Image (spheres, grey):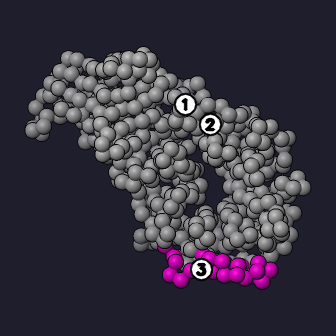
Amino acid sequence: MVFNLMSPGYVGRSSNIDASRLVNFMLEFNSKESKAPATLTGTPGTSLWLSLGASVVRGMNVFNNILYVVTGNKLYSISPFKVVSAALGSLATSVGPVIMKNNGVTVSGVGGNQLMIVDGSAGYIYNVNTGVFTSSSAFTGGGFPATGANSLEFMDGYFVVSQPNSMNTVCSDLYDGTNYHSIAVAPIEGFPDKIQSIWQVQEQLFFIKEYSTEIWYDSGIDAAQGFPFSRMTAAVLDMGTPAPYSVAKGVDGLFMLGSRKIGDGPNFVGAVSVVSDTPKIISPPAITLQMMAWKPWSDVIGYCYEQEGHSFYVLTSPSANQTFVYDASIGDPMVAWHERSTYISGSMYKVNRHVSNSYVNFLGNHLVGDFRNGNIYTLASSLYSDNDTPLISFRTAEILSDNKRDLNSLRINRIQVDAEMGVNGNIAFSFSQDGGHTWSSDYMESLGLTGEYGRRAKWRRVGTFPYGMVARFAISDPCKRVLINGYVD
């Protein structure tokens, strides 16, 4: 009979109920005429694109075909030919994510030639035309928060920032991020919660707070006369975020860890998408339960990117050492999630967070920064290792038990995996008799050398299982990995 490998890939509340797990494999749907309606394919690997030394990559931004990177407390530029500049400026902080935006190259009086950075304690402007780096202590106008800024966005010629631990926001002068009029300040006060993040979506500003979100529009007021944005009528959403750096912009809208106020306090709801003005919970209860264990969520980071028809939201908890990925192109939250892991040491089944600490698309290249150092990697599906470290993909399947559900012993004579063969690699099979708590040794089968396309991966005389069996399949060799389905006798 068919042994379904395409079911949801995350552990349930109890592994004795559902031990499924999908690590460095992702689901891909096929046409109706295909051999199988869906397949599992390996997630992208990485290769070194450039190293900037030992300091961690904190953020990246592309401005006028130049890549700007913050590592440690320094800002650098990198040309399309990978020429690295000397340090362009110094930040007051050396760790933690930074937010980077630019206001465009000046053409006919439009654009400011400015790259802006905020790190939670201050703001910084680098003028790409003059090479001048200015810290917020030297900003003019008196409106920039003295305690720094923890969020940043650019819209309609203005940089918009928020003051940490407050409901206040302020915007720059038109195309000048070094000047903030003290009158260009507004309270975001639909609910009395703090601003966490600011994002522009379809010419609207989303002020995402702790458990609410307000949507504002450009009202046409000049910043010298007041705050140039106004709140849209009835545009206060009952959904916010406890994780400022989890918010990311995708194709259709925003993604974030979500919370909303129930009674007197915020209630964590899991991962959320916000399309137009409609929040939707996208994490199944089993994943939400795992995300609750990430608390506090202040260090959680998220980014979105598109690759080969997939639209990914990558969500990492550094404290919990875990990365979940949502594929918005699938649509069904029950099957749209997988985990990504970077092997560090120990057991090949030890799941860690993914290596990426930040993401940027630079001249068509998907680049990610390492959370451990200043390495920048190319992220591509044609790569089958993590910078020459094994990329270990494994699928833990649903529990196989007697179809009568009367807990009779299950005897398995043969298990076979239908996969792409002739890829110069091996596949490992192991099993658990106790719902995924303990595991057998790995039993290897070849996926075939080049040209051995008709080979089959089979395991015979598997055994008798009094309480059912959980199967696990893993590939660690640097080879293409496509699993089509499984069969069991």
Q: Name the residue tied to disc 2.
A: 378
Mark toward the viewer: 3 or 2: 2
Residue 278, relative to residue 404: is it above or below?
below
**Magenta range:** 216-237
**Camera-side residue: 463 or 79?**
79
Where residue 39 sits, quadrant-wise, is top left
* Residue 103 appears in the picture as rendered: yes
- Residue 273 at x, y percent in the picture: 47, 60
**Mark 1 or 3, nearer chain start:** 3
Residue position for label 3: 231
In the image, what residue occupies the spot 41% across and 57% down? Answer: 282
Left or right of 395? Residue 64 is right
Q: Look at the numbered discs 2 and 1 and tell me whether their residues touch, using CB distance below 8 Å.
A: yes
User: Do the residues under discs 3 and 2 have CB atoms within 8 angstroms?
Assistant: no
Q: Is residue 464 above or below residue 379?
A: above
Q: Residues within 10 Å of mark 2 (few under 14, many from 20)?
A: many
Say which amino acid is labelled 2: Thr
- Residue tagged 1: 383
- Asked if residue 183 can be seen in this view, the reply is no
Marks 3 and 2 sit apart, C-alpha to C-alpha, by 40 Å
Nearer-the-camera pick, 389 or 266:
389
Q: Quadrant of the C terminus?
A: top left
Q: Residue at x 64, y 44 (%)?
A: 364
Q: Is residue 222 magenta?
A: yes
